[in-house]
Amino acid sequence: MSSEPAVRVTDLHKHYGAERAVDGVSFDVAPGQVFALLGPNGAGKSTTVEVLEGYRARTSGEVSVLGADPGRPTPVWRSRLGIVAQSTRDLSDLTVTEVVRQFATFYPHPRRPEAVIEQVGLADDARTRASALSGGRRRRLDVALGIVGDPELLFLDEPTTGFDPEARREFWALVQLLAADGTTILLTTHYLDEVEVLADALAVIDGGRIVATGTPADLGGRDTAPATVRWRDAGGWRTELTPQPAALVARLHAQVGELDGLSVHRPTLEDAYLSLLSSTTSQEASR
Amino acid sequence: MSTTTPPSATARAARTRQPAEPAAFRSPAFLLRTSLARTAVELKELSRSWDALIFNVFFPIIFLFIFGSVFSGDVAPGVSFTQYFTAGMAASGVLLVSFQSLAISIAVERDDGLLKRLEGTPVPPAAYFLGKVGLVVVTGAVQMAVLLTAAHLLFDVDLPAGPQQWWTLAWVTVLGAAAGTLLGIAYSSVPRTGRSASAVTAPVVLVLQFISGVFFVYSQLPGWMQDVAAVFPLKWMAEGFRAALLPESMAAAEPAGEWQLGLIALVLAGWTVVGLLLCRTTFRWRRRGDR
């Protein structure tokens, strides 16, 4: 059972007339994993996720979410999912507690609403109306509604867009808490730091296609890419690009002893990501 | 220097849950529980929304107070204008708490994403609509009770004379609200956005009130206007409430020369069926273009 992926997408297409919003996307999400779908705005992230959530019919391709076809959603299947959609502005006249309690009645084995409110960090705002919450706390309410049914799989569609840095860090801690609890999470984002902190695995999507898959540590081969070693000697700053940085540092150390201002720099996730996007863009241009 | 441990899939075991049985979602108890939860939420939201309270629920009572205070004459010997106007306001009220209230609120809830959010949960779609029905039932009953009480105490309006008139009041209210509810749900798909919902809905109700014998005595309206009004439910509801609230002698003053109770029931039931068909064929859970 547990070896079967929580989400399996094979050659997914979603076309609107001539526009190919999703153009042959494939990836797997393992149970218990935090999987990030990373890409620029308009890359097809949300369209893909909305197919998986059962909101959109696909043009073609095979899709399995918790072993079922999201094109034919059933209440049992829905009860095993939690959905945090991109941006919301409903439910404004109700308090946090009222909203969470209402949604708890929709599920057969809900979590205790008060415990969920506590977990997402809204205990202080339990009696606050949704319309009076700040953007970040409003998003926590969306998460509360996503998890009150005790889902196996949680979709987070660009959950931290528009957050200030502190709110984002707090939100990440919440996601890590849910992941530690064994909830499989499919996250879409265009923030690299978010992926680096949260994701076990990721796929980069651009122009409706997956351009790379991997983990934040090895995306685009950045774990094995040449490293830049930088240090300072009598002649000023020196840099050298090398596939074996440790050997270079050892050799330098043997020659001159301690190195002033030494740094060893591998391509960052951002470097890897941007080079992936620019290579697809240049491919598009050359076609 | 701090080190961070990268997350890894093997570090965590996916928690497996025992999924619910499909039968759990089909049980009447589940539908009842979710419908009551929706009704409770609908009433809470209404109680916090002053514009909806005034324009949908208290509008007929406010207008009764204004018109009752301004016009003191009789439409016929022994029948005050306020008596006649109370029947019209009762009919308007039923249309407002059903048709207008639902057309606007559902258009707004479609636009602001509530319908899509509910679609993403296991809640039965019927629970959403039954929540709306619960809202109409509670607000309609409260409104009718307050309207008749205020009319009786403040303006000496006679209540229905006997059991037969009370019965007429009851079935006209129920049938009118049923037609208004279904037509309101159907009409909610007409406004393109939530912001335009009030502007697209309220004028329809306003015009109907002017031509259906609510603000003016129906028999004094031009014939063509009567003919147009007779297509829509409000005219028939107003006539039904006149049958409940006016003395039997007033029947002769109707254009038909009688209370056409059978025809009233038939027309309101017909609009209920039309509303149901429109809902089934045209209802949308999403904003336009969301597919």
Image (tube, coloured by chain):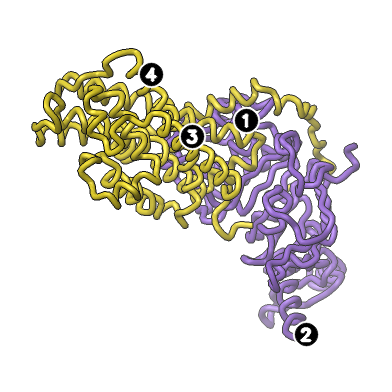
Q: Residues within 10 Å of mark 4 (few under 14, many from 20)?
A: few
Report the residue marked by disc 1.
A106
Rounded to the nearest angstrom, the CA distance separating label 1 from label 2 is 50 Å
Rounded to the nearest angstrom, the CA distance separating label 4 from label 1 is 38 Å
Visible residue check, residue A265: no
Between label 2 and label 3, give the one nearer the viewer. Answer: 3
Report the residue marked by disc 2.
A287
Report the front residue among B265 and B43.
B265
Three-letter amino acid code at the position of disc 3? Ala
Are the residues at dot 1 and dot 3 in contact (C-beta closer than 8 Å)? no
Between label 1 and label 3, give the one nearer the viewer. Answer: 3
Q: Are marks 1 and 3 on the same chain?
A: no
Rounded to the nearest angstrom, the CA distance separating label 4 from label 3 is 17 Å
Chain letter of mark 4 equals B
Q: Residue at x 64, y 24 (%)?
A: B30
Report the front residue among A16 and B104.
B104
Three-letter amino acid code at the position of disc 2? Arg
Rounded to the nearest angstrom, the CA distance separating label 4 from label 2 is 77 Å
SS at badge 4: helix
Please state, as top left, top right, bottom left or bottom right, where the N terminus of chain A lies in the image. top right
Report the residue marked by disc 3.
B269
Are the residues at dot 4 and dot 3 in contact (C-beta closer than 8 Å)? no
Decide if residue B175 is on the left or right side of residue B218. right
Q: Position of residue A100 (x, y in %)?
A: 55, 31
Q: Is residue B121 above or below residue A165?
A: above
Chain A's colour is: purple
Please state, as top left, top right, bottom left or bottom right, where the C terminus of chain A lies in the image. bottom right
Q: Position of residue B197 (x, y in %)?
A: 41, 51
